[in-house]
Image (cartoon, helix red, strand yellow):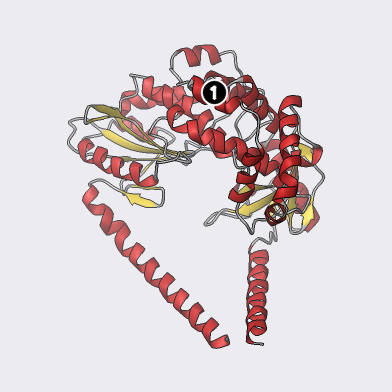
Amino acid sequence: MQRMDNKLFICKMLAMRLKQIEAKHLISSINGCDGQLVQEPKEINNCFREYYMKLYETENNDLNEAHLFFSKITLPSVSETDKTELEAYITEAEVKRAIRCLANGKSPGADGFTIEFYKCFQNTLAPYLTILYNDIIKEGSMTASMRTAIITALPKPGKDHSQMSNYRPLSLLNNDYKLFAKILATRLECVLPSLVHSDQVGYVKGRTVANNIRRLLHVMNKAALLQHPAVMLSLDAEKAFDRIEWPYLFNTLEKYGLGPTCMKWIRALYHKPRACVKTNGIISAPFELSRSTRQGCPVSPIIFILALEPLACAIRANQQISGIDAYGYDFKLNIYADDILLTLSKPEASLPHLFKTIHTFGKLSGYRVNWNKSEATPLNCMTFPAHLAATPIVWRKEGLKYLGINIISPTEKIFELNGPKLLKTIREDLSRWCKSLYKISMEK
């Protein structure tokens, strides 16, 4: 009897939590594409559909300059051993491993089949999925249901939610698609450390945010001793995952030496994908995508950082962009996924060449930086040329926030800026958890 009461209590708590989540994601009004206020639910859904149709529509990026761009950089290639493993047929063991790896409790795609369903019947389903996935790679196309996603617009915290650009599009994909992508992601994870420079710590096995934070602090201490100006610049990328152009993507992945079977696998994931938009319980008519790396797809983060790496290579290779000389190395970049932080010396000369490099890369890839939202701060006390203040970058004397941490020079002030707030958050969390546990124990 007590066990039944406990279950009822847990169900009530979950129901209350679901209502809170639904209320949090309710979109009561937005500014439409024409700037007019829209409040009717169906019209809100139409506005989001129109917005995402335009966002995911190719801008016919220019690949004519690709040869010149790639001639100035050197991308690593997969080894022959790794290439052989990437080219191998999908096995039943890989399918079962992917089923076990996907997390429970996630929203399913349009077909309604949860990952718990696949886990329950994996012995029955795995042989058929193995055949299906190998056939998809051979034919180069997925089924219509696998190609279709439901986009839910999640509000970004601390932003103006009347603007559609301040929502993060999360693609709810069918689990048969996610398993297909997860197997590829698992294979690519093994070769990623050899293809992506240690500057990039996002989604690479064995690398953590702490690596970049610690290195950044060392570089800042060196910069403080320089006899010429040095800056720290945080780039604000505009919809970075959503703007990647597929011709550039496929061209770049081939330059890493990925074999024909692996490339067919990737092309199948991007062959005529479709999406519907869900807002306030309303689902729009589907539309086709012609660019982006889908947020919600297991392999998208890996594909994205491989697509971004040529930009990082170009910045490292450009001798006109001066980094901070420390420990025998020219430190220029700290990257976590699409978060790019640069440490530059001689900004008067370095910044124009940086702008040019990013502009050229953007023409090829679709990558775009919001310069008026990108922020920079001095790393030492040297006098800055007056005209740097006229650049579109936001200059801040009080430091920057990087990966949730307030960074400022001199570094001795960093604990003062972050420590008390962190301790306060920990105390509040502990207090809230204690109250919740006490409430549950009283209900029992």
Q: Position of residue 255 (x, y in %)?
A: 53, 18
Q: Residues within 10 Å of mark 1 (few under 14, many from 20)?
A: some
- Residue 83's place in the image compared with 230, above or below, is above
State left or right for residue 407 relative to residue 34.
left
- Residue 85's place in the image compared with 3, above or below, is above
Residue depicted at 46% across the width and 20% down the height: 75
Q: Is residue 112 visible?
A: yes
Could you say which quadrant of the image residue 390 lies in? top left
Q: Quadrant of the C terminus?
A: bottom right
Residue depicted at 43% across the width and 17% down the height: 74
Residue depicted at 48% across the width and 21% down the height: 79
Count the marks: how many?
1
Q: Out of 434 and 183, give the one closest to the viewer.
A: 183
Could you say which quadrant of the image residue 231 lies in? top left
Could you say which quadrant of the image residue 206 lies in? top left
Q: Secondary structure at mark 1?
A: helix
State left or right for residue 382 relative to residue 80.
left
Q: Position of residue 289 (x, y in %)?
A: 72, 34
Q: Out of 120 and 323, give the one closest to the viewer.
A: 120
Q: Position of residue 235 (x, y in %)?
A: 44, 37
Q: Position of residue 343 (x, y in %)?
A: 32, 34
State left or right for residue 12 relative to residue 426.
right
Q: Amino acid at mark 1?
A: Lys
Residue indicated by mark 1: 83
Q: Is residue 381 visible?
A: no
